[in-house]
Amino acid sequence: MRIAWGITGAGHYLSESYEVFSELKQRHPDLKVSIFISGAGEEVLKMYGLLGSLDSIAPGGYMEEIFLERDQGKSYPKVGRFLMDKYDHLIISPATSNTVAKITHGIADTLVTNAVTQAVKGSVPVHIVPVDIAGVVRSELPYNIDRDLCQNCEDCPPKNECPKQAFTDEPQIDLLLCDGCGNCVDLCPYKAIKGGEVELRIRDIDSRNVRILRGLDEITVLDEPSAILELIL
Ligand SMILES: Cc1cc2nc3c(=O)[nH]c(=O)nc-3n(C[C@H](O)[C@H](O)[C@H](O)COP(=O)(O)O)c2cc1C
């Protein structure tokens, strides 16, 4: 079986999606997975320390590549594969509210939304795990500095030893430089660096878009990443 996995820029359900695909590969090493990552998806994967781990799922070679938005121009030629009978499924997990809104309104202007468009045109089953379904969700944060605990030390070990030089002078963590390695957490004597969680209220418009998505014939909505296991196994 050959699967295309689309990843968008959502922190919510990101590690769960990664775990599900890792389990699929462990249980079926011959499963071929290609990964299509939106521009925001690449940044957010890096912030959560997952970008470098994806090659355990898509190690390279034909039909096991990782495609990044920034390498795919404006016309996304690699999504032509969906018209050529190369994939058995396209699974988008996690799908941001932005990507869901675009799909429900027929917009294809990113690598992942183009993959969905071409998959539908090529009769490839599309399955989407939206993050913003309804109510309130708890979402994992990337590393950040707790200002109540930070003592603004002149000599800041996390800043001095960050391999990505992701700390600014203030200090703040520049998340576009951070790769989520977490080395800084133990280096701060005041335990001021944390991940943590936030509670988010789902917007009405995002719930409505998920309902529209559920009504589309060509697309299946999965309520959480673990449903991918049932689907594929
Ligand atoms: C750390 C971080 C976490 C994010 N988590 C979410 C999320 O859980 N859900 C969401 O809809 N957007 C989230 N976003 C915002 C999206 O990345 C942003 O809307 C982006 O433009 C989506 O583009 P894409 O849909 O093409 O991937 C997050 C952004 C950051 C920096």
Image (cartoon, helix red, strand yellow):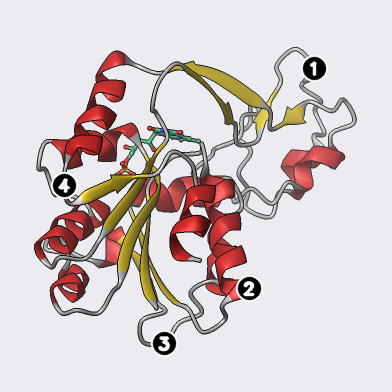
Q: Which mark is residue 217?
A: 4
- Which quadrant contains ligand 1? top left
Q: Which mark is residue 26?
A: 2
- Foreground residue among 210 and 163: 210
Q: CA distance from mark 4 to mark 1?
A: 51 Å
- Foreground residue among 70 and 187: 70
Residue type indicated by callout 2: Gln
Using the image, determine if residue 45 lies above or below residue 89. above
> Which mark sits nearer the N-terminus, 2 or 4?
2
> Which mark sits nearer the N-terminus, 3 or 2?
2
Task: Count residues near mark 1 (Cα–Cα under 10 Å), then give few for <14, some for 14-19, many for 20+.
Answer: few
| Element type at mark 2 | helix
Q: Is mark 2 within 8 Å of ligand 1?
A: no
Q: Position of residue 123 (x, y in %)?
A: 15, 65
Q: CA distance from mark 3 to mark 4?
A: 33 Å
Task: Count residues near mark 2 (Cα–Cα under 10 Å), then give few for <14, some for 14-19, many for 20+.
Answer: few
Q: CA distance from mark 2 to mark 4?
A: 32 Å
Using the image, determine if residue 101 lies above or below residue 74. above
**Residue at 51% in and 38% down:** 11
Q: Which residue is mark 3?
A: 61
| Element type at mark 4 | loop
**Residue at 15% in and 79% down:** 84
Residue type indicated by callout 3: Gly
